[in-house]
């Protein structure tokens, strides 16, 4: 919303605000997708089912503590 305003977009272009926000969002999405892929393929890799409770707890602790 900040950068949709033309005046702020011009003044904040290529600042640490834009770069840090972009990288922070990408790293969070990448880690969440890595965790999701691990939980999805856990059965195929190890032959046992991963506890759904532990995966939910992990997601809550990762999201809330990060």
Image (spheres, helix red, strand yellow):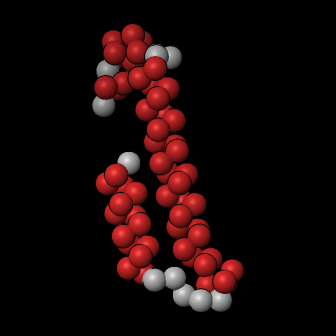
Does 48 appear above or below 19? below
Q: Is residue 13 above or below residue 46?
A: above
Report x, y in % for residue 59. Answer: 40, 64
Q: Residue at x 36, y 24 (%)?
A: 3
Q: Give residue 66's position: percent from left, percent from top.
A: 38, 48
Query: Relative to 13, is 4 above or below?
Result: below
Q: How many marks?
A: 0
Q: Residue at x 46, y 16 (%)?
A: 15
Quarter occupied by residue 7: top left
Can you give x and y, in whole percent of width and height, for residue 13 in the image?
46, 16
Examine the image and state in which quarter residue 34 appears.
Answer: bottom right
Instruction: Tell me what residue is drawn at x 38 percent, y 72 percent.
Output: 56
Q: Answer with left or right where residue 63 lies relative to residue 29.
A: left
Residue nearest the observer in this picture, 58 or 20: 58
Instruction: Reply above or below: 41 against 3.
Output: below
Tell me the quadrant of the picture where the N terminus can be found. top left
Q: Residue at x 62, y 77 (%)?
A: 41
Query: Seen from this angle, which residue lies furthest bottom?
Result: 48
Image quarter for residue 46?
Answer: bottom right
Which of 30 and 13 lies nearest the eye of the viewer? Answer: 30
- Left or right for 4, reference 26: left
């Amino acid at each position: 919303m900040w950068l949709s305003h033309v005046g702020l977009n011009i003044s904040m272009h290529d600042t640490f605000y834009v770069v840090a926000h972009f990288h922070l969002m990408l790293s969070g999405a990448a880690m969440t997708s890595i965790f999701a892929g691990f939980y999805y393929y856990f059965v195929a890799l190890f032959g046992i089912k991963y506890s759904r409770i532990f995966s939910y707890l992990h997601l809550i602790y990762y999201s809330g503590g990060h």
